[in-house]
Image: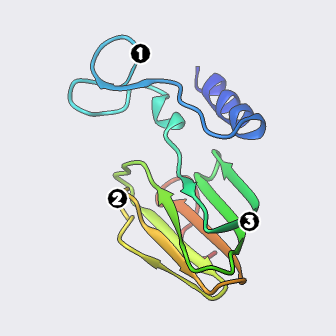
Amino acid sequence: MGRFYREAVASLNRYSSGWAGYVWCYGGGYCAVDERGRFRTNKEQTATPYAPAVAGTVRSDTYDAGTRTYRLAYRASVRPGVTELSLPPSSRGWRLSVTGPARVLGDGTRGGRPVVVARPGSEVVVTVREAGPYGRTDHP
């Protein structure tokens, strides 16, 4: 079943823009989490980082389930704005890095909604990695 989820999420990321596979509820048949708020088996694979709003033109938007790494590359718009990130809860924590003239505002280490502010017109790459056994987080 784990392989099914990995392949389904990879396919949805390749061929769609935004999707939801489960009702976010506590307990019951199609819920992503149980009554205590813990992900059901393999459902954690369906909760990935993404950018609901990008202040610019997206160059690439990828997620690697094997390394639990999200990467967003974009050219910031000429008008000032913020790029919003949505990070699912993680007991391992998230590591955020930005290249280009930009900075991250807000704490997304355990999940949440940090934002990226970039210099207008600049090229920016945002990388979000989950800490833990999915890969090293001590280097980019």
- Which of pointers 1 and 3 indicates the residue nearer the eye? 3
Q: Residues within 10 Å of mark 2 (few under 14, many from 20)?
A: some
Q: Quadrant of residue 29?
A: top left
Secondary element type, mark 1: loop
What's the residue type where badge 2 is placed?
Answer: Arg
Q: Quadrant of residue 139?
A: bottom right
| Distance CA(mark 1)–CA(mark 3) | 35 Å
x and y, in percent, of residue 127 in the image: 61, 67
Give the answer, above or below, for where 132 lies relative to 23.
below
Looking at the rendered structure, the kind of residue marked 1 is: Tyr
The residue identified by callout 2 is 110
Residue 30 image label:
1
Secondary element at tag 3: strand
Snapshot colouring: rainbow
Residue matched to label 3: 57
Q: Which of the pair 99/118 is nearer the observer?
A: 118
Residue 113 drawn at (x, y percent)? 40, 60
Q: Residue at x 71, y 67 (%)?
A: 73
Amino acid type at mark 3: Thr
Q: Residue furthest front?
A: 79
What separation in Å lies between label 1 and label 2 (alpha carbons)?
A: 25 Å
Is 8 left, or right, of 104 in this rendering? right
Q: Which mark is residue 2?
A: none
Q: Earlier in the sequence, mark 3 or mark 2?
A: 3
Task: Name the side, left or right, on which 132 lies relative to 119.
Answer: left
